[in-house]
């Protein structure tokens, strides 16, 4: 298909991305990577569309967007948070990070959501990825992280 026609189909159907995200992936609909995968699915559908009525294209594009978003969701599900059960080599670190991680271990058990969230955030994992892994909203991750951080600050100080 010509790129001008593909661009026209893409622009006329860009609202489908939000529709799929809101109806099928409510908890993840604010994840920018999910929306990017939807745009990729729409663009792929526009490039490979053999022709026909535009209403038929919307059905074709919906399926393509859904498939790309589902592939992204499955990728997120496979993500494992970093394990915090590493053995030390006997060296003792007296720095502030050591104090903070000791407070996390002491305050929260080995399998708590708060510990997982704080550990993942300290490793640079995106809040959206943590939210998708735990099956909660990004706002819930923010709330849990804030409460856990405030509790650790109380323990350290």
Image: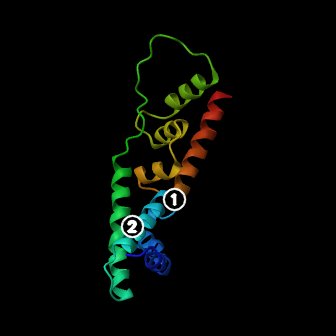
Q: Secondary structure at mark 2?
A: helix
Front residue (pair 60, 89)? 60
Horizontal and vertical percent position of residue 115: 48, 37
Front residue (pair 78, 93)? 78
Can you say which quadrant of the picture contains the N terminus? Answer: bottom left
Q: Which mark is residue 41?
A: 2
The answer to whether residue 103 shows anywhere in this view is yes
Q: Is residue 52 above or below residue 32?
A: below
Horizontal and vertical percent position of residue 116: 46, 39
Looking at the image, is mark 1 or mark 2 earlier in the sequence? 1
Contact flag, marks 1 and 2 (Cβ < 8 Å): no
Front residue (pair 10, 73)? 10
**Other residues around mark 1 within 10 Å, as few (<14) / some (14–19) / many (≥20):** few
On the image, which quarter does residue 52 sit in?
Answer: bottom left
Q: Residue at x 55, y 36 (%)?
A: 122
Front residue (pair 50, 68)? 50
Q: Which residue is mark 1?
A: 32
Q: Residue at x 41, y 23 (%)?
A: 86
Horizontal and vertical percent position of residue 11: 50, 77
Instruction: Classify residue 147 as left or right of residue 36.
Output: right
- For the rendered model, the colour scheme is rainbow
| Residue positioned most to the top | 90
Q: Is residue 103 above or below residue 147?
A: above
Q: Residue at x 33, y 47 (%)?
A: 78
| Residue positioned most to the right | 157
Q: Secondary structure at mark 1?
A: helix
Instruction: Classify residue 64 as left or right of residue 11.
Output: left
The answer to whether residue 28 shows anywhere in this view is no
Can you say which quadrant of the picture contains the C terminus? Answer: top right
The label nearer to you, 1 versus 2, is 2
**Other residues around mark 2 within 10 Å, as few (<14) / some (14–19) / many (≥20):** many
């Amino acid at each position: 298909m010509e790129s001008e026609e593909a661009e026209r189909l893409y622009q006329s159907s860009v609202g489908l991305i939000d529709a799929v995200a809101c109806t099928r992936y409510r908890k993840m609909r604010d994840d920018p990577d999910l929306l990017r995968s939807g745009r990729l699915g729409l663009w792929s559908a526009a490039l490979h569309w053999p022709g026909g009525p535009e209403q038929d294209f919307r059905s074709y594009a919906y399926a393509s967007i859904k498939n790309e978003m589902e592939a992204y969701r499955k990728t997120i599900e496979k993500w494992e948070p970093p394990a915090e059960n590493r053995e030390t080599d006997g060296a003792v670190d007296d720095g502030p990070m050591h104090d903070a991680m000791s407070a996390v271990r002491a305050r929260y058990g080995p399998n708590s959501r708060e510990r997982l969230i704080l550990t993942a955030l300290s490793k640079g994992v995106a809040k959206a990825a943590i939210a998708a892994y735990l099956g909660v909203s990004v706002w819930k991750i923010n709330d849990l992280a804030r409460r856990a951080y405030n509790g650790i600050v109380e323990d350290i100080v």
